[in-house]
């Protein structure tokens, strides 16, 4: 699906990342891209930058294939998808992702009820 604006793409992106496990794998990949970039800068080794797409997309595409079971938005909107990966990551870190998910129609799964003590105890 082609979106005409980033404003319409963002809710779609979030819907494509509705499952918490998908988002977690994206966060791991995104954090690794930041770590690899920092490592390349510290080591003064620009070749390490070649690992950034492997780290980021490896986790992201795995999550889409095996968790979300959908096609990554990277294939239709590569730049907006990249921007959204980092936006989602930093909103999560700041504790501000939940309202964005709700606006996109994604609700958190209810937490499991606490186990009830058995009558024999």
Image (cartoon, rainbow, N blue to C red):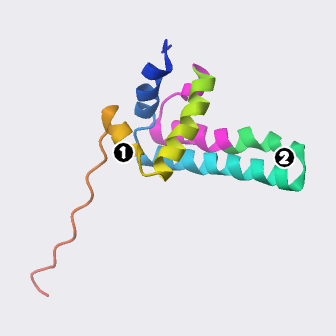
State whether residue 84 is above or below residue 32.
Answer: above
Magenta residues?
56-76
Residue 100 spot, x, y in % from top left = 38, 37
Q: 56 or 66, which is in the foreground? A: 56
Residue 84 spot, x, y in % from top left = 54, 33
Q: Is residue 69 visible?
A: yes
Disc 1 secondary structure class: helix
Q: Identify the residue under disc 1.
A: 98
Return the mark for residue 26: none
State whether residue 32 is above or below residue 10.
Answer: below
Image quadrant of residue 106? top left
In this rendering, which labeled residue sits more in front, label 2 or label 1?
1
Q: Residue at x 43, y 26 (%)?
A: 12
Residue 44 spot, x, y in % from top left = 90, 51
Q: Is 7 displayed left or right of 25 in the figure? A: left
Q: Residue at x 78, y 44 (%)?
A: 51
Q: Is residue 20 magenta?
A: no
Q: Identify the residue under disc 2.
A: 48
Image quadrant of residue 16? top left
Disc 2 secondary structure class: helix
Q: Residue at x 53, y 46 (%)?
A: 90
Q: Is 20 displayed left or right of 32 in the figure? A: left
Q: Residue furthest left?
A: 119
How crowded pointer 1 is (Cα within 10 Å; few <14, some 14-19, many 20+) is rated as some
Q: Is residue 59 magenta?
A: yes
Q: 115 or 46, which is in the foreground? A: 46
Residue 3 spot, x, y in % from top left = 48, 15
How crowded pointer 2 is (Cα within 10 Å; few <14, some 14-19, many 20+) is rated as some
Q: Is residue 65 visible?
A: no
Question: How far, Cα to Cα, is label 2 from label 1?
Answer: 34 Å
């Amino acid at each position: 699906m082609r979106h005409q604006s980033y404003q319409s793409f963002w809710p779609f992106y979030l819907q494509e990342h509705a499952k918490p496990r998908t988002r977690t794998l994206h966060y791991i990949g995104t954090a690794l891209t930041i770590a690899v970039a920092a490592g390349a800068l510290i080591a003064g080794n620009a070749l390490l930058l070649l690992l950034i797409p492997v780290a980021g997309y490896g986790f992201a595409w795995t999550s889409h294939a095996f968790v979300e079971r959908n096609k990554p938005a990277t294939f239709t909107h590569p730049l907006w998808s990249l921007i959204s990966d980092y936006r989602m990551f930093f909103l999560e870190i700041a504790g501000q992702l939940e309202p964005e998910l709700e606006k996109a129609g994604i609700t958190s799964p209810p937490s499991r009820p606490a186990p009830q003590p058995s009558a024999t105890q």
